[in-house]
Image (cartoon, grey):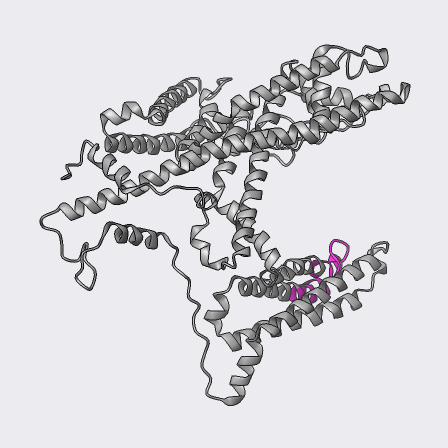
Amino acid sequence: VEEPSSLTVTSDVRYRLPAWNPPCGLTESLELLCFLVFVVDVSVKSYLIGWKEFWKNKWLMAYILTLIVSLADWIVSLSFFCKESVRIRRILRPFFLLQNSSMMKKTLKSINSTLPEMARWVIAQKTSFHRMDNQQDKEWVVYFRNLPDSLTSLLVLLTTANNPDVMIPAYSKNRAYSIFFILFTVLGNLFLMNLLTAIIYNQFRGYLLKSVQSSLFRRRLGIRAAFEVLSSLKETPASSLKMYSCDQLSAAQFQKLFEELDKDAIKQHPPSPEYQSHFMQKMQFAFGHPYFGYLGNVVALANIISICVVLVLDADKQPSERDDFFLGAINCFFILYYLLEMLLKILAMGLKRYLSYPSNRFDGLLTVILLVSALLAYTFLGLRPEFMGLLSLWDMVRLVNMLIVFRFLRIIPNMKFMALVVTTLLDLVKNLRAFAGILVVIHGELCSHQPVISCSAANTTHDNVTLQCGTYEQLEYWPNNFDDFAAAVVTLWDVMVVNNWQVFLDAFSRYSSPWAKVYFVAWWLISSVIWVNLFVALLLENFIHKWDRRCQRESLSGIEYQRTVELMFRDVLEEPTEEELMEKLHQHPHLQLCR
Protein backbone atom coordinates (compact mmCIF):
# COMPACT_ATOMS: atom_id res chain seq x y z
CA VAL A 1 0.00 0.00 0.00
CA GLU A 2 2.80 2.43 0.81
CA GLU A 3 4.39 4.49 -1.95
CA PRO A 4 4.86 3.31 -4.68
CA SER A 5 1.44 1.76 -4.21
CA SER A 6 0.36 -1.47 -5.90
CA LEU A 7 -3.29 -0.34 -5.98
CA THR A 8 -3.68 -0.25 -9.75
CA VAL A 9 -5.68 -2.46 -12.07
CA THR A 10 -2.64 -3.38 -14.15
CA SER A 11 1.12 -3.25 -13.74
CA ASP A 12 1.65 -2.69 -17.48
CA VAL A 13 3.58 0.57 -17.82
CA ARG A 14 1.67 1.37 -21.04
CA TYR A 15 -1.81 1.29 -19.54
CA ARG A 16 -1.26 1.83 -15.82
CA LEU A 17 -3.01 4.85 -14.34
CA PRO A 18 -1.43 6.85 -11.51
CA ALA A 19 -1.80 4.84 -8.30
CA TRP A 20 -3.33 6.18 -5.11
CA ASN A 21 -0.61 6.68 -2.54
CA PRO A 22 -1.50 7.00 1.15
CA PRO A 23 -0.80 10.32 2.84
CA CYS A 24 2.36 10.66 4.85
CA GLY A 25 1.87 9.28 8.35
CA LEU A 26 -0.86 6.73 7.59
CA THR A 27 1.26 3.64 6.95
CA GLU A 28 3.92 5.03 9.27
CA SER A 29 1.39 5.02 12.15
CA LEU A 30 0.54 1.38 11.51
CA GLU A 31 4.24 0.62 11.30
CA LEU A 32 4.84 2.33 14.65
CA LEU A 33 2.20 0.09 16.27
CA CYS A 34 3.99 -2.95 14.87
CA PHE A 35 7.29 -1.65 16.23
CA LEU A 36 5.76 -1.24 19.69
CA VAL A 37 4.51 -4.84 19.61
CA PHE A 38 8.00 -6.00 18.59
CA VAL A 39 9.59 -3.95 21.37
CA VAL A 40 7.31 -5.54 23.97
CA ASP A 41 8.00 -8.98 22.48
CA VAL A 42 11.78 -8.66 22.56
CA SER A 43 11.69 -7.09 26.04
CA VAL A 44 9.71 -9.97 27.52
CA LYS A 45 11.91 -12.57 25.85
CA SER A 46 15.10 -10.86 27.00
CA TYR A 47 13.81 -10.57 30.58
CA LEU A 48 12.74 -14.20 30.75
CA ILE A 49 16.00 -15.73 29.56
CA GLY A 50 18.21 -13.47 31.70
CA TRP A 51 21.04 -11.09 30.92
CA LYS A 52 23.74 -13.76 30.59
CA GLU A 53 21.73 -15.84 28.15
CA PHE A 54 20.76 -12.74 26.21
CA TRP A 55 24.34 -12.11 25.08
CA LYS A 56 24.55 -15.71 23.86
CA ASN A 57 21.36 -15.48 21.80
CA LYS A 58 22.29 -14.11 18.39
CA TRP A 59 18.69 -14.01 17.19
CA LEU A 60 17.60 -11.73 20.03
CA MET A 61 20.57 -9.44 19.49
CA ALA A 62 19.78 -9.28 15.78
CA TYR A 63 16.13 -8.65 16.74
CA ILE A 64 17.07 -5.60 18.81
CA LEU A 65 19.53 -4.32 16.21
CA THR A 66 16.89 -4.63 13.47
CA LEU A 67 14.41 -2.73 15.63
CA ILE A 68 16.89 0.06 16.33
CA VAL A 69 17.77 0.47 12.65
CA SER A 70 14.10 0.32 11.63
CA LEU A 71 13.05 2.91 14.19
CA ALA A 72 15.91 5.21 13.15
CA ASP A 73 14.91 4.86 9.51
CA TRP A 74 11.27 5.50 10.48
CA ILE A 75 12.27 8.77 12.17
CA VAL A 76 14.31 9.80 9.12
CA SER A 77 11.32 9.02 6.90
CA LEU A 78 9.05 11.34 8.89
CA SER A 79 11.67 14.08 8.96
CA PHE A 80 11.72 14.04 5.14
CA PHE A 81 7.89 13.99 5.04
CA CYS A 82 7.95 10.48 3.50
CA LYS A 83 9.79 11.73 0.40
CA GLU A 84 13.07 9.90 0.94
CA SER A 85 14.28 7.79 -1.99
CA VAL A 86 15.53 4.80 0.03
CA ARG A 87 13.92 3.09 3.01
CA ILE A 88 16.32 0.73 4.73
CA ARG A 89 13.63 -0.77 6.95
CA ARG A 90 11.89 -2.28 3.94
CA ILE A 91 14.79 -4.67 3.50
CA LEU A 92 14.67 -5.58 7.21
CA ARG A 93 10.94 -6.30 7.43
CA PRO A 94 11.15 -10.00 6.45
CA PHE A 95 13.40 -10.57 9.49
CA PHE A 96 10.42 -10.11 11.82
CA LEU A 97 8.63 -12.98 10.09
CA LEU A 98 11.74 -15.15 10.18
CA GLN A 99 12.68 -14.69 13.85
CA ASN A 100 9.21 -15.62 15.14
CA SER A 101 9.32 -19.16 13.71
CA SER A 102 11.71 -21.69 15.22
CA MET A 103 11.14 -24.05 12.28
CA MET A 104 12.02 -21.32 9.79
CA LYS A 105 15.22 -20.65 11.74
CA LYS A 106 16.14 -24.33 11.60
CA THR A 107 15.34 -24.43 7.89
CA LEU A 108 17.46 -21.36 7.21
CA LYS A 109 20.38 -22.75 9.21
CA SER A 110 20.13 -26.04 7.35
CA ILE A 111 20.05 -24.27 3.98
CA ASN A 112 23.03 -22.15 5.02
CA SER A 113 24.93 -25.30 5.92
CA THR A 114 24.35 -26.74 2.45
CA LEU A 115 25.80 -23.71 0.66
CA PRO A 116 29.44 -24.94 0.75
CA GLU A 117 28.50 -28.09 -1.14
CA MET A 118 26.53 -26.03 -3.61
CA ALA A 119 29.45 -23.61 -4.06
CA ARG A 120 31.70 -26.49 -5.08
CA TRP A 121 29.13 -27.55 -7.66
CA VAL A 122 28.84 -23.99 -9.04
CA ILE A 123 32.64 -23.74 -9.35
CA ALA A 124 32.69 -27.04 -11.23
CA GLN A 125 29.96 -25.81 -13.54
CA LYS A 126 31.77 -22.52 -14.15
CA THR A 127 34.94 -24.43 -15.04
CA SER A 128 32.99 -26.49 -17.54
CA PHE A 129 31.55 -23.29 -19.03
CA HIS A 130 35.07 -21.96 -19.64
CA ARG A 131 36.08 -25.16 -21.38
CA MET A 132 33.01 -25.25 -23.59
CA ASP A 133 33.18 -21.67 -24.86
CA ASN A 134 35.93 -22.14 -27.45
CA GLN A 135 33.90 -21.72 -30.61
CA GLN A 136 34.02 -18.26 -32.16
CA ASP A 137 31.85 -17.55 -35.19
CA LYS A 138 29.88 -14.65 -36.53
CA GLU A 139 26.78 -16.83 -36.56
CA TRP A 140 27.00 -17.06 -32.78
CA VAL A 141 27.16 -13.32 -32.15
CA VAL A 142 23.66 -13.30 -30.64
CA TYR A 143 24.40 -15.78 -27.85
CA PHE A 144 28.20 -16.11 -27.62
CA ARG A 145 29.65 -12.72 -28.53
CA ASN A 146 31.69 -12.51 -25.29
CA LEU A 147 32.40 -14.50 -22.17
CA PRO A 148 29.57 -13.04 -19.97
CA ASP A 149 27.00 -13.64 -22.71
CA SER A 150 28.36 -17.14 -23.29
CA LEU A 151 28.08 -17.99 -19.60
CA THR A 152 24.55 -16.55 -19.49
CA SER A 153 23.45 -18.49 -22.58
CA LEU A 154 24.83 -21.77 -21.26
CA LEU A 155 23.36 -21.15 -17.81
CA VAL A 156 19.93 -20.55 -19.33
CA LEU A 157 20.41 -23.65 -21.50
CA LEU A 158 20.99 -25.55 -18.27
CA THR A 159 17.33 -24.84 -17.49
CA THR A 160 16.31 -25.58 -21.14
CA ALA A 161 14.53 -22.19 -21.29
CA ASN A 162 16.34 -21.10 -24.48
CA ASN A 163 16.40 -24.50 -26.16
CA PRO A 164 16.56 -24.84 -29.17
CA ASP A 165 16.95 -21.09 -29.88
CA VAL A 166 20.54 -21.00 -28.66
CA MET A 167 21.43 -23.97 -30.87
CA ILE A 168 19.79 -22.82 -34.12
CA PRO A 169 22.50 -20.37 -35.41
CA ALA A 170 25.23 -23.02 -35.19
CA TYR A 171 22.96 -25.92 -36.12
CA SER A 172 21.81 -24.16 -39.28
CA LYS A 173 25.46 -23.95 -40.36
CA ASN A 174 26.48 -27.49 -39.48
CA ARG A 175 24.35 -30.22 -37.98
CA ALA A 176 27.34 -31.60 -36.08
CA TYR A 177 27.09 -28.64 -33.67
CA SER A 178 23.90 -30.17 -32.27
CA ILE A 179 26.03 -32.83 -30.57
CA PHE A 180 27.59 -30.19 -28.31
CA PHE A 181 24.22 -28.79 -27.19
CA ILE A 182 22.66 -32.22 -26.72
CA LEU A 183 25.58 -33.43 -24.61
CA PHE A 184 25.56 -30.22 -22.59
CA THR A 185 21.82 -30.54 -21.90
CA VAL A 186 22.06 -34.22 -20.99
CA LEU A 187 25.05 -33.79 -18.72
CA GLY A 188 23.98 -30.48 -17.22
CA ASN A 189 20.23 -30.75 -16.89
CA LEU A 190 19.66 -34.47 -16.45
CA PHE A 191 22.77 -35.43 -14.48
CA LEU A 192 24.41 -32.44 -12.80
CA MET A 193 21.20 -30.62 -11.81
CA ASN A 194 19.67 -33.79 -10.37
CA LEU A 195 22.97 -34.57 -8.66
CA LEU A 196 22.88 -31.08 -7.18
CA THR A 197 19.38 -31.79 -5.89
CA ALA A 198 20.65 -34.95 -4.22
CA ILE A 199 23.65 -33.13 -2.70
CA ILE A 200 21.53 -30.26 -1.40
CA TYR A 201 18.88 -32.49 0.11
CA ASN A 202 21.39 -34.92 1.62
CA GLN A 203 23.20 -32.09 3.38
CA PHE A 204 20.00 -30.31 4.32
CA ARG A 205 18.40 -33.49 5.68
CA GLY A 206 21.47 -34.17 7.81
CA TYR A 207 21.46 -30.72 9.39
CA LEU A 208 17.69 -30.72 9.82
CA LEU A 209 17.83 -34.15 11.44
CA LYS A 210 20.49 -32.87 13.83
CA SER A 211 18.30 -29.89 14.69
CA VAL A 212 15.21 -32.07 15.22
CA GLN A 213 17.26 -34.44 17.40
CA SER A 214 18.39 -31.47 19.49
CA SER A 215 14.77 -30.30 19.84
CA LEU A 216 13.71 -33.76 20.98
CA PHE A 217 16.46 -33.80 23.61
CA ARG A 218 15.43 -30.38 24.95
CA ARG A 219 11.81 -31.46 25.11
CA ARG A 220 12.63 -34.65 26.99
CA LEU A 221 14.93 -32.66 29.29
CA GLY A 222 12.20 -30.13 30.09
CA ILE A 223 9.68 -32.85 30.90
CA ARG A 224 12.17 -34.68 33.10
CA ALA A 225 13.10 -31.43 34.88
CA ALA A 226 9.42 -30.79 35.65
CA PHE A 227 9.10 -34.33 37.01
CA GLU A 228 12.17 -33.98 39.23
CA VAL A 229 11.06 -30.60 40.59
CA LEU A 230 7.54 -31.84 41.41
CA SER A 231 8.96 -34.99 43.00
CA SER A 232 11.33 -33.01 45.23
CA LEU A 233 8.69 -30.63 46.61
CA LYS A 234 7.83 -31.34 50.24
CA GLU A 235 4.31 -29.93 50.01
CA THR A 236 3.30 -31.54 46.76
CA PRO A 237 -0.46 -31.71 46.21
CA ALA A 238 -1.70 -35.25 46.52
CA SER A 239 -3.10 -35.27 43.00
CA SER A 240 -0.10 -33.87 41.15
CA LEU A 241 2.01 -36.99 40.67
CA LYS A 242 -0.31 -39.73 41.84
CA MET A 243 -2.70 -41.86 39.88
CA TYR A 244 -6.12 -42.91 41.05
CA SER A 245 -4.60 -46.07 42.50
CA CYS A 246 -2.52 -43.82 44.80
CA ASP A 247 0.68 -45.16 43.23
CA GLN A 248 3.48 -42.70 42.51
CA LEU A 249 3.91 -41.80 38.84
CA SER A 250 7.24 -42.85 37.34
CA ALA A 251 9.30 -40.63 35.03
CA ALA A 252 8.32 -42.76 32.03
CA GLN A 253 4.62 -42.45 32.89
CA PHE A 254 5.00 -38.69 33.36
CA GLN A 255 6.56 -38.40 29.89
CA LYS A 256 3.82 -40.60 28.45
CA LEU A 257 1.28 -38.20 29.91
CA PHE A 258 2.77 -35.31 27.94
CA GLU A 259 2.80 -37.39 24.76
CA GLU A 260 -0.90 -38.08 25.21
CA LEU A 261 -1.57 -34.38 25.76
CA ASP A 262 0.16 -33.64 22.44
CA LYS A 263 -2.34 -35.69 20.51
CA ASP A 264 -5.21 -33.90 18.87
CA ALA A 265 -8.57 -34.69 20.34
CA ILE A 266 -10.40 -37.22 18.23
CA LYS A 267 -13.45 -35.49 16.89
CA GLN A 268 -16.60 -37.41 17.68
CA HIS A 269 -19.46 -37.04 15.25
CA PRO A 270 -22.89 -36.36 16.76
CA PRO A 271 -25.17 -39.41 16.92
CA SER A 272 -27.80 -40.04 14.28
CA PRO A 273 -31.44 -39.49 15.22
CA GLU A 274 -33.34 -42.50 16.54
CA TYR A 275 -36.65 -43.03 14.76
CA GLN A 276 -39.42 -45.11 16.26
CA SER A 277 -41.16 -45.81 12.96
CA HIS A 278 -40.05 -48.96 11.20
CA PHE A 279 -40.41 -47.21 7.82
CA MET A 280 -38.20 -44.30 8.92
CA GLN A 281 -35.60 -46.74 10.18
CA LYS A 282 -35.45 -48.35 6.76
CA MET A 283 -35.20 -44.93 5.15
CA GLN A 284 -32.37 -44.03 7.52
CA PHE A 285 -30.52 -47.25 6.72
CA ALA A 286 -30.91 -46.80 2.96
CA PHE A 287 -29.94 -43.15 2.69
CA GLY A 288 -27.23 -43.35 5.33
CA HIS A 289 -25.56 -46.30 3.58
CA PRO A 290 -22.24 -45.67 1.75
CA TYR A 291 -23.81 -47.00 -1.45
CA PHE A 292 -26.08 -43.95 -1.52
CA GLY A 293 -22.95 -41.79 -1.56
CA TYR A 294 -21.54 -43.90 -4.40
CA LEU A 295 -24.73 -43.22 -6.36
CA GLY A 296 -24.17 -39.50 -5.84
CA ASN A 297 -20.65 -39.88 -7.24
CA VAL A 298 -22.04 -41.57 -10.35
CA VAL A 299 -24.56 -38.77 -10.83
CA ALA A 300 -21.82 -36.15 -10.39
CA LEU A 301 -19.76 -37.96 -13.05
CA ALA A 302 -22.77 -37.97 -15.39
CA ASN A 303 -23.16 -34.24 -14.72
CA ILE A 304 -19.54 -33.60 -15.68
CA ILE A 305 -19.89 -35.63 -18.88
CA SER A 306 -23.08 -33.78 -19.85
CA ILE A 307 -21.43 -30.39 -19.25
CA CYS A 308 -18.47 -31.37 -21.43
CA VAL A 309 -20.74 -32.62 -24.22
CA VAL A 310 -22.85 -29.43 -24.23
CA LEU A 311 -19.77 -27.20 -24.16
CA VAL A 312 -18.25 -29.05 -27.11
CA LEU A 313 -21.47 -28.91 -29.13
CA ASP A 314 -21.94 -25.19 -28.47
CA ALA A 315 -18.30 -24.19 -28.86
CA ASP A 316 -18.64 -22.90 -32.44
CA LYS A 317 -22.14 -21.46 -32.08
CA GLN A 318 -23.08 -17.87 -31.45
CA PRO A 319 -25.01 -17.14 -28.22
CA SER A 320 -28.17 -16.55 -30.23
CA GLU A 321 -27.86 -19.96 -31.90
CA ARG A 322 -27.46 -22.01 -28.71
CA ASP A 323 -30.30 -24.17 -27.47
CA ASP A 324 -30.61 -23.05 -23.87
CA PHE A 325 -33.68 -25.19 -23.27
CA PHE A 326 -31.70 -28.44 -23.44
CA LEU A 327 -29.02 -27.11 -21.10
CA GLY A 328 -31.70 -25.79 -18.77
CA ALA A 329 -33.41 -29.16 -18.57
CA ILE A 330 -30.13 -30.88 -17.75
CA ASN A 331 -29.33 -28.32 -15.06
CA CYS A 332 -32.77 -28.64 -13.49
CA PHE A 333 -32.46 -32.41 -13.27
CA PHE A 334 -29.06 -32.41 -11.60
CA ILE A 335 -29.86 -29.52 -9.25
CA LEU A 336 -33.03 -31.24 -8.10
CA TYR A 337 -31.14 -34.48 -7.53
CA TYR A 338 -28.44 -32.73 -5.49
CA LEU A 339 -31.09 -30.98 -3.42
CA LEU A 340 -32.94 -34.26 -2.87
CA GLU A 341 -29.70 -36.03 -1.94
CA MET A 342 -28.84 -33.36 0.61
CA LEU A 343 -32.29 -33.47 2.22
CA LEU A 344 -32.32 -37.27 2.38
CA LYS A 345 -28.89 -37.34 3.99
CA ILE A 346 -30.00 -34.78 6.57
CA LEU A 347 -33.05 -36.95 7.24
CA ALA A 348 -30.90 -40.05 7.73
CA MET A 349 -28.00 -38.50 9.65
CA GLY A 350 -29.53 -35.49 11.33
CA LEU A 351 -28.42 -31.91 10.65
CA LYS A 352 -25.60 -31.82 13.23
CA ARG A 353 -24.09 -35.12 12.10
CA TYR A 354 -24.46 -34.12 8.45
CA LEU A 355 -22.58 -30.85 9.01
CA SER A 356 -19.85 -32.58 11.03
CA TYR A 357 -18.43 -34.09 7.82
CA PRO A 358 -16.41 -31.68 5.61
CA SER A 359 -17.48 -33.49 2.44
CA ASN A 360 -21.14 -32.99 3.33
CA ARG A 361 -20.59 -29.30 4.04
CA PHE A 362 -18.88 -28.93 0.68
CA ASP A 363 -21.68 -30.76 -1.15
CA GLY A 364 -24.35 -28.78 0.66
CA LEU A 365 -22.67 -25.46 -0.12
CA LEU A 366 -22.42 -26.36 -3.81
CA THR A 367 -26.05 -27.41 -3.88
CA VAL A 368 -27.18 -24.12 -2.33
CA ILE A 369 -25.05 -22.13 -4.80
CA LEU A 370 -26.46 -24.05 -7.76
CA LEU A 371 -30.02 -23.64 -6.52
CA VAL A 372 -29.67 -19.89 -5.91
CA SER A 373 -28.00 -19.42 -9.31
CA ALA A 374 -30.78 -21.29 -11.08
CA LEU A 375 -33.45 -19.22 -9.32
CA LEU A 376 -31.63 -16.00 -10.23
CA ALA A 377 -31.33 -17.12 -13.82
CA TYR A 378 -35.05 -17.88 -13.99
CA THR A 379 -36.38 -14.81 -12.20
CA PHE A 380 -33.83 -12.08 -12.90
CA LEU A 381 -32.33 -12.84 -16.31
CA GLY A 382 -35.43 -14.58 -17.62
CA LEU A 383 -37.64 -11.55 -16.94
CA ARG A 384 -35.07 -8.95 -18.05
CA PRO A 385 -34.28 -9.55 -21.76
CA GLU A 386 -32.02 -6.46 -21.89
CA PHE A 387 -29.41 -8.43 -19.94
CA MET A 388 -29.25 -11.18 -22.54
CA GLY A 389 -26.44 -9.46 -24.41
CA LEU A 390 -24.31 -9.35 -21.27
CA LEU A 391 -25.16 -12.73 -19.77
CA SER A 392 -27.43 -15.33 -21.34
CA LEU A 393 -30.12 -17.15 -19.40
CA TRP A 394 -27.99 -20.17 -18.54
CA ASP A 395 -24.45 -18.81 -18.72
CA MET A 396 -24.38 -18.08 -15.00
CA VAL A 397 -25.65 -21.56 -14.12
CA ARG A 398 -23.24 -23.10 -16.59
CA LEU A 399 -20.31 -21.36 -14.89
CA VAL A 400 -21.42 -22.49 -11.45
CA ASN A 401 -21.94 -25.99 -12.78
CA MET A 402 -18.22 -26.25 -13.31
CA LEU A 403 -17.93 -26.47 -9.52
CA ILE A 404 -19.41 -29.94 -9.88
CA VAL A 405 -15.95 -31.01 -11.00
CA PHE A 406 -14.80 -30.28 -7.45
CA ARG A 407 -17.83 -32.12 -6.12
CA PHE A 408 -16.58 -35.21 -7.91
CA LEU A 409 -13.35 -34.93 -5.89
CA ARG A 410 -15.24 -36.39 -2.94
CA ILE A 411 -14.47 -39.84 -4.36
CA ILE A 412 -10.85 -39.36 -3.23
CA PRO A 413 -11.36 -40.74 0.32
CA ASN A 414 -12.79 -43.91 -1.27
CA MET A 415 -9.60 -44.46 -3.28
CA LYS A 416 -6.75 -45.37 -0.94
CA PHE A 417 -3.95 -44.35 -3.27
CA MET A 418 -5.51 -40.97 -4.08
CA ALA A 419 -6.26 -40.45 -0.39
CA LEU A 420 -2.57 -41.05 0.32
CA VAL A 421 -1.57 -38.43 -2.24
CA VAL A 422 -4.04 -35.88 -0.88
CA THR A 423 -3.04 -36.40 2.75
CA THR A 424 0.60 -35.98 1.75
CA LEU A 425 -0.16 -32.65 0.09
CA LEU A 426 -2.25 -31.50 3.06
CA ASP A 427 0.54 -32.43 5.45
CA LEU A 428 2.98 -30.33 3.45
CA VAL A 429 0.62 -27.37 3.51
CA LYS A 430 0.08 -27.71 7.27
CA ASN A 431 3.51 -28.59 8.54
CA LEU A 432 6.06 -27.38 6.01
CA ARG A 433 5.00 -23.76 6.33
CA ALA A 434 8.61 -22.95 7.17
CA PHE A 435 9.64 -23.45 3.54
CA ALA A 436 6.87 -21.18 2.32
CA GLY A 437 7.94 -18.67 4.96
CA ILE A 438 11.53 -18.77 3.73
CA LEU A 439 10.33 -18.09 0.18
CA VAL A 440 8.23 -15.15 1.41
CA VAL A 441 11.23 -13.77 3.31
CA ILE A 442 13.44 -14.04 0.23
CA HIS A 443 10.73 -12.45 -1.90
CA GLY A 444 10.55 -9.56 0.53
CA GLU A 445 14.31 -9.13 0.55
CA LEU A 446 14.68 -9.13 -3.24
CA CYS A 447 11.62 -7.09 -4.28
CA SER A 448 12.90 -3.67 -5.27
CA HIS A 449 10.72 -0.59 -5.48
CA GLN A 450 12.82 1.30 -8.01
CA PRO A 451 11.39 1.69 -11.55
CA VAL A 452 13.76 0.11 -14.07
CA ILE A 453 11.79 0.08 -17.32
CA SER A 454 9.97 3.35 -17.87
CA CYS A 455 6.74 4.14 -19.68
CA SER A 456 8.62 6.26 -22.19
CA ALA A 457 10.70 3.24 -23.19
CA ALA A 458 7.51 1.24 -23.69
CA ASN A 459 5.95 3.92 -25.86
CA THR A 460 9.12 4.31 -27.92
CA THR A 461 9.51 0.61 -28.66
CA HIS A 462 5.79 0.06 -29.10
CA ASP A 463 5.82 2.04 -32.35
CA ASN A 464 8.87 0.22 -33.66
CA VAL A 465 7.79 -2.44 -36.13
CA THR A 466 11.27 -3.98 -36.42
CA LEU A 467 11.50 -5.42 -32.93
CA GLN A 468 13.71 -8.46 -32.58
CA CYS A 469 11.71 -11.63 -32.10
CA GLY A 470 11.78 -13.05 -28.58
CA THR A 471 12.81 -9.85 -26.82
CA TYR A 472 11.13 -8.19 -23.85
CA GLU A 473 9.63 -5.54 -26.12
CA GLN A 474 8.39 -7.91 -28.85
CA LEU A 475 6.80 -10.26 -26.30
CA GLU A 476 5.21 -7.25 -24.57
CA TYR A 477 6.41 -8.23 -21.11
CA TRP A 478 5.79 -4.69 -19.86
CA PRO A 479 3.64 -5.81 -16.86
CA ASN A 480 6.72 -7.65 -15.51
CA ASN A 481 8.61 -4.89 -13.74
CA PHE A 482 9.77 -3.67 -10.33
CA ASP A 483 7.73 -0.47 -10.20
CA ASP A 484 5.79 -1.61 -7.12
CA PHE A 485 5.87 -4.46 -4.63
CA ALA A 486 3.08 -6.55 -6.19
CA ALA A 487 4.60 -6.32 -9.68
CA ALA A 488 8.02 -7.27 -8.26
CA VAL A 489 6.58 -10.40 -6.60
CA VAL A 490 5.01 -11.56 -9.88
CA THR A 491 8.22 -10.83 -11.80
CA LEU A 492 10.30 -12.89 -9.39
CA TRP A 493 7.74 -15.69 -9.59
CA ASP A 494 8.02 -15.72 -13.40
CA VAL A 495 11.80 -15.92 -13.13
CA MET A 496 11.55 -18.76 -10.60
CA VAL A 497 9.49 -20.79 -13.09
CA VAL A 498 12.45 -20.25 -15.53
CA ASN A 499 10.23 -20.22 -18.60
CA ASN A 500 11.66 -17.49 -20.87
CA TRP A 501 13.68 -16.10 -17.99
CA GLN A 502 16.46 -15.24 -20.45
CA VAL A 503 14.15 -12.46 -21.65
CA PHE A 504 14.32 -10.85 -18.19
CA LEU A 505 18.10 -11.26 -18.06
CA ASP A 506 18.51 -9.48 -21.38
CA ALA A 507 15.97 -6.68 -20.84
CA PHE A 508 16.94 -5.61 -17.32
CA SER A 509 20.65 -5.76 -18.16
CA ARG A 510 19.97 -3.37 -21.08
CA TYR A 511 17.69 -0.97 -19.22
CA SER A 512 19.55 -0.90 -15.90
CA SER A 513 22.98 -2.51 -15.69
CA PRO A 514 24.75 -5.72 -16.80
CA TRP A 515 24.96 -6.57 -13.10
CA ALA A 516 21.21 -7.22 -13.17
CA LYS A 517 22.10 -10.68 -14.48
CA VAL A 518 23.81 -11.45 -11.18
CA TYR A 519 20.63 -10.47 -9.34
CA PHE A 520 18.42 -12.78 -11.42
CA VAL A 521 20.90 -15.67 -11.37
CA ALA A 522 21.13 -15.37 -7.57
CA TRP A 523 17.33 -15.47 -7.34
CA TRP A 524 17.25 -18.51 -9.65
CA LEU A 525 19.80 -20.33 -7.49
CA ILE A 526 17.97 -19.54 -4.26
CA SER A 527 14.40 -20.13 -5.38
CA SER A 528 14.46 -22.66 -8.21
CA VAL A 529 17.60 -24.66 -7.47
CA ILE A 530 17.63 -24.72 -3.66
CA TRP A 531 14.11 -24.02 -2.41
CA VAL A 532 12.08 -25.83 -5.06
CA ASN A 533 14.39 -28.86 -5.05
CA LEU A 534 14.20 -29.09 -1.26
CA PHE A 535 10.44 -28.85 -1.37
CA VAL A 536 10.21 -31.59 -4.00
CA ALA A 537 12.60 -33.81 -2.04
CA LEU A 538 10.61 -33.36 1.18
CA LEU A 539 7.42 -34.04 -0.72
CA LEU A 540 8.85 -37.33 -1.95
CA GLU A 541 10.13 -38.31 1.48
CA ASN A 542 6.82 -37.51 3.13
CA PHE A 543 4.99 -39.56 0.50
CA ILE A 544 7.39 -42.50 0.84
CA HIS A 545 7.03 -42.38 4.62
CA LYS A 546 3.25 -42.54 4.35
CA TRP A 547 3.48 -45.27 1.72
CA ASP A 548 5.65 -47.35 4.04
CA ARG A 549 3.15 -46.90 6.88
CA ARG A 550 0.35 -47.88 4.49
CA CYS A 551 2.24 -51.04 3.57
CA GLN A 552 2.47 -51.78 7.29
CA ARG A 553 -1.34 -51.58 7.38
CA GLU A 554 -1.37 -48.62 9.74
CA SER A 555 -4.43 -46.42 9.60
CA LEU A 556 -3.78 -42.99 8.17
CA SER A 557 -6.43 -41.45 10.39
CA GLY A 558 -4.74 -42.86 13.45
CA ILE A 559 -1.64 -40.71 13.01
CA GLU A 560 -3.29 -37.39 12.34
CA TYR A 561 -1.85 -35.95 15.53
CA GLN A 562 1.68 -36.76 14.33
CA ARG A 563 1.57 -34.69 11.14
CA THR A 564 4.78 -32.83 11.75
CA VAL A 565 8.25 -32.67 10.24
CA GLU A 566 9.53 -34.75 13.17
CA LEU A 567 7.34 -37.64 12.00
CA MET A 568 9.50 -38.08 8.91
CA PHE A 569 12.53 -38.59 11.14
CA ARG A 570 10.76 -40.64 13.82
CA ASP A 571 12.43 -43.87 12.69
CA VAL A 572 15.96 -42.45 12.96
CA LEU A 573 15.61 -40.21 16.01
CA GLU A 574 17.32 -41.49 19.14
CA GLU A 575 15.65 -41.16 22.51
CA PRO A 576 18.02 -39.67 25.10
CA THR A 577 19.15 -42.08 27.81
CA GLU A 578 18.44 -41.72 31.51
CA GLU A 579 22.10 -40.96 32.20
CA GLU A 580 22.24 -38.18 29.60
CA LEU A 581 19.14 -36.48 30.96
CA MET A 582 20.22 -36.63 34.60
CA GLU A 583 23.75 -35.48 33.83
CA LYS A 584 22.40 -32.46 31.96
CA LEU A 585 19.95 -31.68 34.77
CA HIS A 586 22.67 -31.77 37.43
CA GLN A 587 24.71 -29.31 35.36
CA HIS A 588 21.83 -26.83 35.21
CA PRO A 589 22.67 -23.71 37.26
CA HIS A 590 19.09 -23.13 38.50
CA LEU A 591 18.23 -26.68 39.57
CA GLN A 592 19.36 -28.11 42.89
CA LEU A 593 18.71 -31.85 42.62
CA CYS A 594 19.90 -34.54 44.99
CA ARG A 595 22.28 -37.00 43.38
Examine the structure image and report whether residue 393 is included in the region drawn in magenta. Answer: yes
241 sits left or right of 106 in the view? left
**Please, which residue is most extreme toward the left here?**
234
Q: Nearer the viewer, residue 32 or 249?
A: 249
Quadrant housing the C terminus: top left
Viewer-proximal residue among 481 and 432: 432
Residue at 19% across, 31% down:
589
Q: Quadrant of residue 570?
A: top left
Q: Does residue 240 lie above or below 526 as drawn?
A: below
Q: Quadrant of residue 318?
A: bottom right
How many numbered marks, from 0 up? Answer: 0
How far from the left and from the top, in percent, is residue 569? 46, 43
Residue 384 visible in the shown view? no
Q: Is residue 427 magenta?
A: no
Instruction: Please give left or right for residue 472 compared with residue 318 in the image.
Output: left
- How would you classify the magenta stretch by its main secondary structure? helix
Q: Is residue 255 above or below residue 270?
A: above
Asked if one can make out residue 193 in the rendered structure from this viewpoint, the answer is: yes
Residue nearer the viewer, 540 or 297: 540
Horizontal and vertical percent for residue 492? 61, 29
- What's the residue at 52%, 61% (across, down)? 358
Residue 129 drawn above or below residue 289: above
Residue 508, image quadrant: top right
Give percent across and percent down for residue 55: 28, 22
Please name whichever residue, 181 or 267, is drawn nearer the observer in this view of the structure: 181
Image: magenta residue range: 374-397
Query: Does 256 sit left or right of 165 as displayed?
Result: left
